[in-house]
Amino acid sequence: MTFQILTINPGSTSTKIAWYSDEEEVWRETLRHDPEAIGAFQSVAAQFEFRLETIGEVVRNHSFSFDDLSAVAGRGGLVEPIPGGTYKVDDAAADTAPQRKAMGTRVQPGRDTR
């Protein structure tokens, strides 16, 4: 089974993303955001839908889908500070993310694809 992984690195005015098939990079892009557009949001959390839509458009332009994903890896986040590392997201962890309601069924905590 091949694992499909989307990596996300949100910055102040850009979002860097890359798609991997197992350990091989398939594509990479830096999405530049208009500083005025980003500045219109009250908080970083409020940018969630904006960034999600932008990332989704790029993923579709590469003929991929979020449904193809085995995992998403990101830098930063909107959870309480925790030590760096890899975490399996369970219901308790997912419930702390303000985006869970916005994501709906796209958040699948504890999904084990191996």
Image: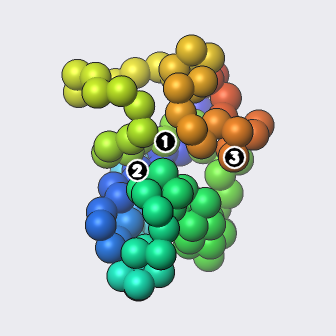
Residue 102, how many percent across, how many down? 69, 46
Assess whether mark 1 and mark 2 are in contact (beta carbons under 8 angstroms): yes
Report the disc number at residue 7: 2
**Residue shown at 33%/73% (left/top)?**
13
Decide which of 54, 78 is in the foreground and name it: 78
State which tag comes first along the sequence, 2 or 3.
Answer: 2
Q: Amino acid at mark 1?
A: Val
Q: Residues within 10 Å of mark 3 (few under 14, many from 20)?
A: few
Mark 3 and mark 1: Cα distance apart in space: 17 Å
In the picture, the quarter occupied by the C terminus is: top right
The residue that mark 1 highlights is: 72
Is residue 25 visible to the viewer in this orientation of the structure? no
Rendered view: 24 above or below 38: above
Report the disc number at residue 102: 3
Q: Residues within 10 Å of mark 1 (few under 14, many from 20)?
A: few
Q: Quadrant of residue 27?
A: bottom left
Q: Amino acid at mark 3?
A: Ala
Q: Nearer the viewer, mark 3 or mark 1?
A: 3
Residue 29, how many percent across, how many down? 39, 72
Residue 87, how many percent across, how many down? 40, 21
**Residue shown at 42%/39% (left/top)?**
78
Q: Does dot 2 land on a helix, a strand or a loop?
A: strand
Q: Amino acid at mark 2?
A: Thr
Q: Residues within 10 Å of mark 2 (few under 14, many from 20)?
A: some
State which tag comes first along the sequence, 2 or 1.
Answer: 2
Q: Quadrant of residue 91?
A: top right
Rendered view: 104 above or below 91: below
State which tag comes first along the sequence, 3 or 1.
Answer: 1
Q: Quadrant of residue 38?
A: bottom left
Give left or right: position of 11 versus 6. Answer: left
